[in-house]
Each structure stands twice: as structure tokens, then as C-alpha cells.
Image (spheres, rainbow, N blue to C red):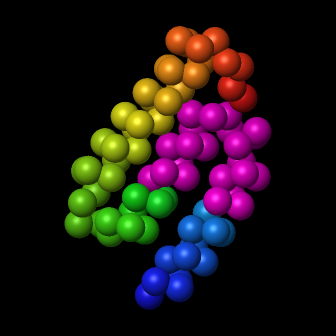
Amino acid sequence: KTFIRIVLTIVLTVIYALIFERLGFLISTIIFLGAIMFLINGYKRWLQNILVTVIFSDIAWYTFAQLLNVSLP
């Protein structure tokens, strides 16, 4: 089970890298983190997974794009 999670994490990371430029930082990060959260926590904690994913992605985007004025795709 651990090996499958490691392989899926690598696959999800490659997919994230491929969709990053096309979908932009915010959307691709939400998709990536959501997938990782569901992989780790399962579907029983779906509300927690979604909240953590969206809140973390928004805070990261706001910090880099607005506060630090870093250009994100």
C-alpha cells in the first residue's frame, strides 16, 4: 500500500508539472493538492481535504502574487 502511494504521488507530481503552465498556479495547485489529500486521508475526510486544499492554495497564491509581487502563471 505504501509503494502504491509513492508511485501515485510521483505520477500526480508529473501531471501537476504538465498542467501547471496550461491551467495556471491556482487551479493546478488545487487539483494537485486535492488529489494528494484524498490519496493520504481518503474520502472519509472529504470536507477537511477540500478546505485545506483551497485555503492553502489561496494563501500561497495571495502571498506570492499579491504580497511578494511574484508573477505566477
Left or right: residue 28 compared with residue 63? right
Q: Where is residue 55 shown, x and y percent of the image?
A: 37, 34
Image point (68%, 38%), residue name: 23
Q: Where is residue 12 shown, x and y percent of the image?
A: 61, 63
Left or right: residue 61 compared with residue 41? right
Q: Where is residue 26 shown, x and y percent of the image?
A: 56, 33
Decide: is 35 above or below 69: below
Indicate yes or no whether the magenta region holds residue 17: yes
Decide: is 52 above or below 24: below
Report the magenta stretch's main SS: helix
Q: Quadrant of the C terminus?
A: top right
Left or right: residue 8 compared with residue 45? right
Image point (50%, 30%), residue name: 60
Q: Nearer the viewer, residue 3 or 15?
A: 3
Q: Where is residue 52 shown, x and y percent of the image?
A: 34, 44
Q: Nearer the viewer, residue 73 or 22?
A: 73
Decide: is 51 above or below 64: below
In this picture, which residue range is highlighted in magenta?
13-34
Q: How many marks?
A: 0
Q: Quadrant of the N terminus?
A: bottom left
Image point (59%, 14%), residue name: 68
Indicate yes or no whether the magenta region holds residue 25: yes
Image point (32%, 69%), residue name: 42
